[in-house]
Every structure is written in structure tokens, then in C-alpha cells.
Image: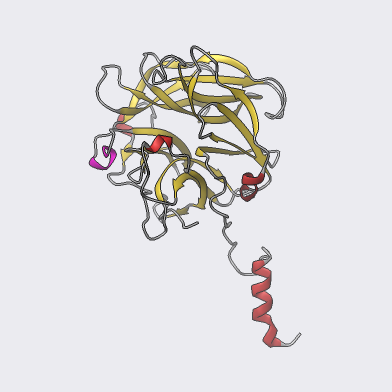
Amino acid sequence: MHIAYLPALGMLLALAGCQVAGTPPTEPRFANPLVQQRADPHVTLQPDGWYYFTATVPEYDRIEVRRARSLNDLGKAEANVVWRKHASGEMGAHIWAPELHRIDGKWYLYFSAGRADKVWEIRLYVLENSADNPLEGEWIERGQLRTGWESFALDATTFAHRGQRYLAWTQGAPDGSKGTNIYLARMDGALAIRQPAVLLTRPDLPWEQIGHHVNEAPAVLVKHGRVLLTYSASATDANYALGLVSARDDANLLDPASWTKSPVPVLRSSEENGQYGPGHNSFTTSLDGKTDILVYHARNFREIVGEPLRDPNRHTRAQPITWRADGMPDFGAPVAD
């Protein structure tokens, strides 16, 4: 082959996804938005090689699960409805923020729901499925996940660390004070928490108080010697942004003093990229496990007509996470569509 063609060959190999010897691996690229009109996205990559996806649907009336071999294929994957809201009573309204987790050989869906007759009386609930494939088998209602006090509660997530399972979630304080906070507790199995729960973060910074006093939607990533917990703050319009608290991975996670809070958002609206209100994220990786990936929702316009929660155009997006020399994540800006 003539030497003049080698640069072009290298470019073609890169475009084909091949790696030329001596070059660093390329980061995955995403066809954002991955899934239209799906907010609060949760993605889990399982050992079977499937990405499993669930999220809030605009009608707030059901839970869907879909799967694909790549994140870019989630948008065209079949959306399997695995559960629908009740016609009356509890679990009858505002079906929000489902998360799918595989624990001790069973599947669990953690989600938030209000009552049909009191739609803002929102609590945490759990579904269980013993099938190998969560798109098969039977989803059994395991009822309310009790937190130790009764108040507005949503956005539960669970993670295991050093042999102990934890639940992190959003709830109004026991004393009825303004806003929603993030709490953490140990779990006994998949269906119960062990008291006491501890307060990790409350909306005490100005950027967390725009429109509403909100800390919500925790998501956890353990990496580079740290436990990283992201959360979302402020109203669900262009002011919505991602915050971060972190602890050493050998610290007592139930000691609030173990956690350090970023004073500024770690992901916020980008006028330049046309992305507004990024938040309510989850974490996953590339298929080879080498690239950490942030999955989140955002809108591609700023001005919203009416109540933001009634606007269906929060779309699921993804982008690679870069890491600073000190081991902390750099989420950058939400990338353009």
C-alpha cells in the first residue's frame, strides 16, 4: 500500500470502531437524546450483556422496562409495561422514578406513588420478581417501603458497599420543615431499612432553592476510593441542576461528618449546548467496563408553558464521565443533541 493512504486508513479504522495499535481507546458516543420523553432514567448493565432501562413516563400511570445491547438502541427497544397504577387508594397516582435492581437473585423495582384520592401523599413502594428475566415472570407488590416516619417521600435508590446494603432516598424532614432532603440508612434485605436513618444533605445553598427548596433523586457511584452521591436540586425547569456529596470509601457512611458537599452544581443548564435542567441521573458503564457513563434527563429548550411537571419533554441522555487527577469526577456540561 502506498504510504499516502495510511492516514486515511487510520481514520477509517477509527470510524469503524477499531483501535489502531498505540492509540488510546475511544470513548463511546451517544445519539442523544437516547429515549424521548422519558425522565428520571435508570440504567443497569447486567452480566448477561443487556442494558436494562426504566424511567418516568409522561402520563405518570405505569412502569415500563426495556432492554438493549447498547445504550444507543434503548430508544427503539420495546417498552414492556410491567405494572400499572391502581384505580383507587394507594399507588393510584404520580408513578415516578422507578429503579430496577438485581438483589440476591431477584429483581426489585423501587418507585414512588401517590394515592388516587390524595395525589401528593407520595411514598416509596417496591415490586419483586423472581424470574431470571425481568421482562418475564410475575411482578408482586411488596407494599410500602417504610422509612421510619410518614411524609412526602420519593426517589429511592439502593447500593451495596463493603458487604452492607444501603438505601438513599428523598423525604420531607420529620419535623415538617420546608423542602426535601436526602437520607441514608442500612437495609435488612431488599425490603426494609434499619433505623436510624441519617440526613446527608438538605437544600441549604441558594442554587438548591430556586422555585422550590429541593434535594432529591440520589444516585451512587463508588470509584477511586470514594463513595459519590449525586442529587438534583431546585425546580424541575431550567434551574434544575446536579449536586454532589462524597465520602471516603472506608468511612462510616452513616456519620454525616464523613460527607463533603460541593458548594456549586456539578452539572447545570448549558445555553451554548441547548440543554436545560439536567438532572435525576443514574450511572452505568460501557460494555467493557472501562468508561463510566452518566445517564440523565434534560430538555432542549428553556421556556416551558405552564407547570414544568406537566411538560413531557424531559428526554433521556448520556455522556462519558471524565476523572480529574484527584480522583473526583468531572461531568462537564450537558452535551448538545
Name the residue at the front extreme: 305
Q: Which colour assignment does the render follow?
A: secondary structure
Is 335 one of the magenta-colored residues?
Answer: no
Instruction: Please state the horizontal and vertical placement of residue 106, each as a whole percent of the image.
Output: 65, 23
- Of 237 and 179, nearer the camera is 237
Identify the residue at image location x=50%, y=35%. 58
Instruction: Please state the horizontal and vertical placement of residue 121, each as a whole percent of the image.
Output: 39, 18
Name the residue at the top extreme: 89
- Can residue 247 be seen from the camera position used here? no
State whether residue 201 is above or below residue 294: above
- Of 61 and 128, nearer the camera is 61
Report whether 248 appears left or right of 40: left
Name the image quarter holding residue 13: bottom right
Instruction: Please state the horizontal and vertical placement of residue 104, each as a whole percent of the image.
Output: 63, 23
Location of the N terminus (image quadrant): bottom right
Magenta stretch, main secondary structure class:
helix
State whether residue 101 is above or below residue 152: below
Segment tinted magenta in the rendering: 206-210
In this rendering, the count of numbered labels is 0
Report whether 203 appears left or right of 119: left
Name the image quarter holding residue 5: bottom right
Report whether 289 appears left or right of 149: right
State whether residue 263 is above or below residue 138: below
Instruction: Please state the horizontal and vertical placement of residue 120, each as a whole percent of the image.
Output: 39, 21
State whether residue 113 is above or below residue 13: above
- Can residue 73 be seen from the camera position used here? yes
